[in-house]
Each structure stands twice: as C-alpha cells, then as structure tokens.
Image: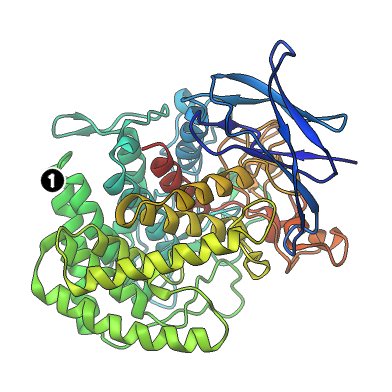
C-alpha cells in the first residue's frame, strides 16, 4: 500500500510545507476543497534512510500560502485533507493545555469543564509516610503523572518548568484560553495556563516537609489495576525525601515565584518561601540523597544517578530571580562538576550536551534556560549560548540524513521517543528565538511538528484528537475504562521505541526500522503511554512556533 505522509492538522501560511511519499512519483498536485488544482510540482527522490526504512520521495509545496483546505494527489494516490491557515494550530494548542485539567487528581475537576470526561473525586485520603511512625499527611491535588495514578515530585516539577519557561519566553501563551475553572489573582482572573499550573504547584508544595526536604513521590505501593481514579482505594504512601526532588522543587518554585508575582503577589511569596526552604535543605545536605523504590513496590521510580544537574538548575533559577551573587557562585561551581559528568557521558557515546538536557532526569538544560533569561553578558551566559548553538547545529545536520527532515537518529527511538524529539525542538526553539535566529532551525522545528502530527512512516498523528489518523488507544487507565470511545484530546503518545519492552509491543514485526516500532494499543505502555512531561514540552514548542 502506498502512502502520502504529511502533517494531518495543517500548516501556517508562511511555513515550509512538505509531504513524504513512499512510492515513486514524477509529479504531484495540490487540490482545493472544490477539487481544483492550485499548485503542482515535481517529487524529488531522497532515497532510503536508517530511521524510516522507506525509499522516499519529497513533495515540497511551500509555495501554497492561501488559506483553505487541501489534498495532495500523486501517482494515483491521495492524502488526507489538511488546512492552511494562521489559526491552524488553535485547537491543538487548546487541547494540549487542557489535557492537564483532565489529569487533575482529588476533587479539582467538575462536570461543567470536564464534560463527558468527568470523574468523581479520587485519592482524597491522607498519605502514610513510608517507614515512619508519624501522622498521615494531606497531599491531595496535583496531576496524575501518566497512565497510572502516581504523583511524582521530580516529574511534576519538570512538566511545570517546561510550561513556565514557555510563559517566560513566549508571552502569548498567557492568552490561550481552554475552558477551565477561573482562579482569582490580584487584579482579576489568572490566565488559564497559570491557573492550571497552580494546581500542580499547590501539590508540589504539599510534598515539602517542615525541614525543607521534599518527598520523592506519593503513590499506592503498587500500580492500580485498570480502574477509574475514584475506584483506586489502596493506601497512599509518601516515599522518602530525595535531594533530586528537593532541588527540583527549589528550582521550579523560584521560577514560579518570578512568574506569579505580577498576578498574585501573596502566592508568589508563598512559592519563594518554599523555594528558600528547599535550597536551605540542599546547603545543609551537600551529599546526594538519591532514590530507589522500596522492595516490592513497582510504581514509577524516577531514579537518577546524580543530583548535580538538579542543584545546578536550582542555583541558576535562584540567580535569575534574585541576582544574588551567592547563587551565581553556586551555579558556576556546579557547572564545573557537570562538565566532568558530561565528559564521562560522552565517553559512553552520548552525543548531546548536558547543558541542553531538558528531561525529567537530566535537568541542567532547565538551569540553562534560566541563565539565558538573564539580561547580562557574563561568561556563563556566553558559554550556555554557544552550547545551544552547537547542539542546534548538530540537530539540523541530523535532519538532513532522512527524507522526513527529522532531527533524530536511530538511537533516539527509545521509550518516550516523542519526548526526545520535543526536547530537541525546545533546544532549536530557544536557539532560533533567543540566541541566533536561523532559517534552518525554524525549518527543522517545523519538520519535527510535521512528524508528530502525521508526517511519519506510521502515518499517524501522535496527538489524540488532532489529525484524521490520530492515535486512539493510549495506555491510560481512565480512557481505557470510561466507556467513551474516543480518548480526551491533546494527549501526546510516547511514540516508536526499538526496545519494545511490553508483551503487546513484541507484536511489532521483527527488525522493523526505528520509526515503525510502534503499535496503537492500550497494552503498549512502552510505546503508547502518556505523561505530563511529554505534553509540557509540546506546549513550549508550540508557544514558540506561534510567537
């Protein structure tokens, strides 16, 4: 069967536009909604690449700029319909922001705003502090992390950070309205995105002990079966404090204090107090306090090998907020330790730069985002800038190795490969918008969004409800058992993964190329789970694309 792969949602009028064909075609035509040919061209042969395994032909139709609905025809084949419009991504933007609302835990959801996806209050009981004979603690609230019902401090902090850095860099994100309950600030309602993020920040501050340390996670001892959230009645446990969680909460609360000060001054002060308490704990506990699951527990571990990047993020975030020299000194000292860590990583084959890492485990890149917000030209800013440029150039070079112009390599198709892509697009976005604007960066970002929304060799949009062939079966408990045919919109799938770590994923044909190691099935937790920190970088990237 022949395919015309393209972004199934559509294109901005002035963006680069392409479709990828897995068959030979001398020419192609663009038809409007009346069936009239409005543009034609020659499909250029690219050849076979490692990541898709396809012998590809590329149809470039960047000359199509008029608003409308179109199809591509080539070699007797027809594509899905797509739009060209300045507003083409409005629904996508609202959906990827509102998905956090649907992931709310406890009693923070209502029928008016959740509609058919409403569920009853869940996980309202106090949590037992694991291994301690102390009173249970109220940690209600926040967002369910992923396909399960766990709530994790480090993962939550990183998801919040992606969004709040999006706000800091791209103010138009504050204008996105996506139908959630209003929250009052100093001068009226908070912008929707800040109202939603506040739900998770409130929870993260509840995870802080009186001494400033932060519990690593709150979950049941083992993952719940596939039941609705309110039917998960097992005992909740708060698992031990880690320096990872404490540093991440210090960093994100300092970041948030700077954002919310213009909207809710008292809340900003509360965030800053939590951040200072966490930073004080870090100074009093300079040795790493890492995390391992309790024996027999199988909920998300979110373990890390070191906490240097977390502490660097905290120092950088505080310095950007306060300008106080002691935080700059801390950041520079931790930077030197990170350089040694980066050398060891490169010795093991890693090709990126630790200072551009933006995931839940290696968070030095988040510290870099704080440094790049500074209005000064010190050596730290110059060094971070040069590292982002070098990494962006590497990604552009990678994009030229395949017909999809995707900035990934075969080794990037791991568990959560779509987050790997989105982290790369964040790097390209910051480099293009803040450091050194370049057409190649913007085009590579566009190609990455195209891939996510259907221009891939699976011919699927990896965002629910967006695109004619959007995936429909996320590994997500509520959507699996709520008796509603469609999942809620705006969820990002983990995506292709050569590891195929679950039993259902092993049904993917052996020796499939990386881009084809995917199966849209609810059992495929290693391919098709969702998480808050797979959605959050897409919010950042789309905010940049539309700014």
The image quadrant of residue 400 is bottom right
Image x and y of residue 42, in percent: 74, 36
Residue 237 appears in the figure:
no
Residue 449 appears in the figure:
yes
230 vs 210: above or below: above
Q: Residue furthest top?
A: 34
Image x and y of residue 151, in percent: 47, 58
Q: Nearer the viewer, residue 439 or 107?
A: 439
Counting the numbered discs, the total is 1
Image x and y of residue 7, in percent: 64, 37
Quadrant that contains the N terminus: top right
The image quadrant of residue 455 is top right
> What sort of colour scheme is used for the picture?
rainbow
| Residue at 74 percent of width and 26 percent of height | 29
Q: Name the side, left or right, on which 8 lies relative to 26.
A: left
The image quadrant of residue 384 is bottom left
Q: Secondary structure at mark 1?
A: helix
Quadrant that contains the C terminus: top left
| Residue at 23 percent of width and 76 percent of height | 331
Label 1 crowd bin: few (<14), some (14–19), many (20+), radius 10 Å: some
Image x and y of residue 267, in percent: 18, 47
463 vs 277: above or below: above
| Residue at 47 percent of width and 28 percent of height | 90
212 vs 73: above or below: below
Q: Name the side, left or right, on which 439 lies relative to 297.
A: left
177 vs 36: above or below: below
Residue beneath disc 1 = 266
| Residue at 29 percent of width and 80 percent of height | 335
């Amino acid at each position: 069967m022949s395919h015309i792969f393209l972004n199934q949602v559509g294109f901005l009028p002035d963006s680069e536009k392409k479709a990828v064909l897995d068959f030979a075609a001398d020419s192609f035509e663009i038809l409007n909604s009346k069936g009239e040919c409005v543009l034609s061209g020659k499909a250029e042969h690219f050849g076979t690449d490692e990541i898709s395994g396809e012998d590809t032909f590329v149809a470039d139709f960047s000359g199509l700029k008029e608003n409308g609905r179109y199809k591509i025809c080539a070699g007797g084949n027809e594509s899905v319909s797509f739009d060209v419009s300045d507003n083409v991504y409005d629904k996508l933007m609202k959906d990827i922001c509102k998905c956090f609302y649907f992931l709310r835990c406890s009693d923070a959801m209502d029928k008016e705003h959740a509609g058919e996806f409403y569920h009853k209050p869940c996980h309202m009981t106090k949590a037992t502090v694991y291994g301690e004979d102390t009173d249970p603690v109220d940690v209600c609230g926040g967002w369910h992390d992923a396909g399960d019902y766990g709530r994790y401090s480090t993962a939550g902090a990183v998801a919040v950070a992606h969004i709040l850095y999006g706000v800091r860099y791209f103010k138009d994100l504050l204008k996105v309205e996506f139908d959630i309950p209003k929250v009052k600030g100093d001068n009226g309602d908070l912008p929707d995105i800040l109202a939603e993020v506040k739900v998770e920040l409130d929870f993260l501050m509840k995870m802080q002990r009186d001494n400033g340390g932060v519990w690593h996670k709150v979950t049941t001892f083992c993952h719940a079966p596939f039941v609705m959230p309110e039917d998960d009645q097992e005992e909740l446990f708060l698992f031990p404090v880690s320096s990872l969680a404490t540093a991440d909460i210090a960093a994100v609360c300092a970041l948030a204090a700077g954002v919310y000060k213009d909207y809710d001054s008292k809340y900003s002060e509360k965030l800053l107090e939590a951040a200072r308490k966490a930073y004080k704990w870090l100074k009093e506990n300079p040795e790493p306090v890492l995390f391992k699951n309790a024996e027999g527990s199988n909920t998300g571990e979110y373990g890390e090998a070191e906490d240097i990047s977390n502490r660097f993020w905290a120092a950088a975030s505080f310095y950007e907020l306060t300008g106080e020299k002691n935080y700059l000194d801390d950041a520079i000292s931790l930077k030197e330790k990170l350089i040694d860590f980066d050398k060891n990583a490169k010795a093991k084959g890693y090709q990126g730069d630790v200072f551009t890492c933006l995931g839940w485990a290696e968070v030095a890149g988040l510290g870099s985002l704080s440094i790049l917000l500074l209005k000064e030209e010190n050596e730290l800013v110059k060094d971070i800038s040069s590292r982002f440029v070098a990494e962006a150039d590497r990604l552009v070079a990678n994009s030229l190795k395949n017909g999809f112009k995707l900035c990934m390599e075969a080794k990037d198709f791991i568990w959560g490969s779509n987050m790997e892509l989105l982290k790369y697009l964040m790097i390209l976005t910051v480099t293009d918008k803040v450091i050194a604007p370049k057409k190649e960066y913007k085009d590579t970002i566009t190609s990455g969004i195209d891939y996510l929304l259907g221009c891939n060799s699976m011919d699927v949009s990896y965002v629910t409800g967006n695109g004619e062939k959007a995936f429909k079966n996320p590994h997500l408990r509520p959507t699996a058992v709520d008796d509603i045919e469609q999942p809620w919109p705006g969820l990002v799938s983990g995506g292709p993964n050569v590891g195929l770590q679950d039993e259902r994923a092993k049904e993917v044909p052996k020796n499939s190329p990386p881009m084809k190691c995917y199966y849209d099935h609810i059992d495929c937790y290693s391919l098709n789970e969702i998480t808050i920190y797979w959605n959050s970088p897409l919010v950042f990237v789309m905010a940049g694309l539309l700014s």
